[in-house]
Amino acid sequence: MKLLFIGGTGVISSACSDLAVEHGLEVYHLNRGKTAGIRNTKEVNTIYADIRNVSETSEAIRNHHFDVVVDFLAYEPSHIQNAIALFAGKTKQYILISTASAYQTTEILAVTEDTPLDNPFWEYSRNKIACEKVLKDTAFKSSFPFTIVRPSHTRNN
C-alpha cells in the first residue's frame, strides 16, 4: 500500500509514519523539507513541495498515485479545496486530520457523531469545522473518497 502523509514530521504524523513503516507500508511525506531533522522517520520517501503552492505540488506528485493520502496540514477551507484539486483521481482515500475540539462542549461525557460541531471559543476549531464542511460538500458532489478523523489526545514521548 502506498501512503502519503502531508506533513509527516509533526507529533502525530511522525508517530503514524513510524507505525506505517513497521507494518510494511510504502510511506511518502509531502513537505518542504525544513523540519525533517526534528522527527526523522527512516525508510520514508520524501516529496519536496510546499502544499500551499498548488502548481509546485501538482508537478511534484505528477507521476504518483496513492492508495491513501492523510492530510495533517489542512487548517482552513482553501486548503481543502486545493487538496481536492490536487488529489482527485490520485488517491483511493483522502483522510483529513481534524480535531475533537470541533465538537460542542456538553455536560455529558459521551461525545458521539451526533454531537454538534460548534466551538465558539477557539478559532482553530471553527476553521477545522469549516474545513470539514467544505470537504463534505465538495466531496459528495464529486465522489471524492474521504474520511475525517478527529483526534482527541496527543502526547509526545
Image: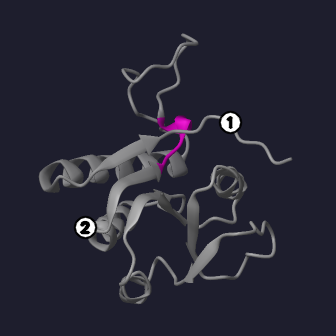
Q: Is residue 62 above or below residue 20?
A: below
* Numbered badge on residue 79: none
Q: Say few, some or many: other residues with alpha carbon within 10 Å of mark 2 (under 14 / 14 to 19 / 20 or more).
A: few
Q: Is residue 67 left or right of residue 17?
A: left
- Disc 2 is placed on an element classified as loop
Q: Earlier in the sequence, mark 2 or mark 1?
A: 2
Q: Residue at x 52, y 82 (%)?
A: 50
Q: Residue at x 78, y 66 (%)?
A: 39
Residue at 60 percent of width and 82 percent of height: 32
Q: Is residue 98 magenta?
A: yes
**Percent coordinates x, y for residue 68 in the rendering:** 43, 57
Q: Residue furthest right?
A: 157
Of the numbered discs in the image, which one, if any, rests on residue 153? 1
Nearer to me, 62 or 120: 62
What's the CA distance linking mark 2 and mark 1? 32 Å
In this rendering, the answer to whether 37 lies above or below 77 is below
* Residue 74, above or below 103: below
Of badges 2 and 1, the one in the foreground is 2
Does the magenta portion include 1?
no
Q: Give the image location of residue 97, x and y in percent.
A: 50, 49
135 sits to left or right of 70: left
The type of residue carrying mark 1 is: His
Residue type beneath disc 2 = Gly
Q: Position of residue 71 (x, y in %)?
A: 48, 59
Bounds of the magenta span?
97-102
The residue that mark 2 highlights is 89
Residue 80 in percent (x, y) is at: 36, 62
Q: Secondary structure at mark 1?
A: loop
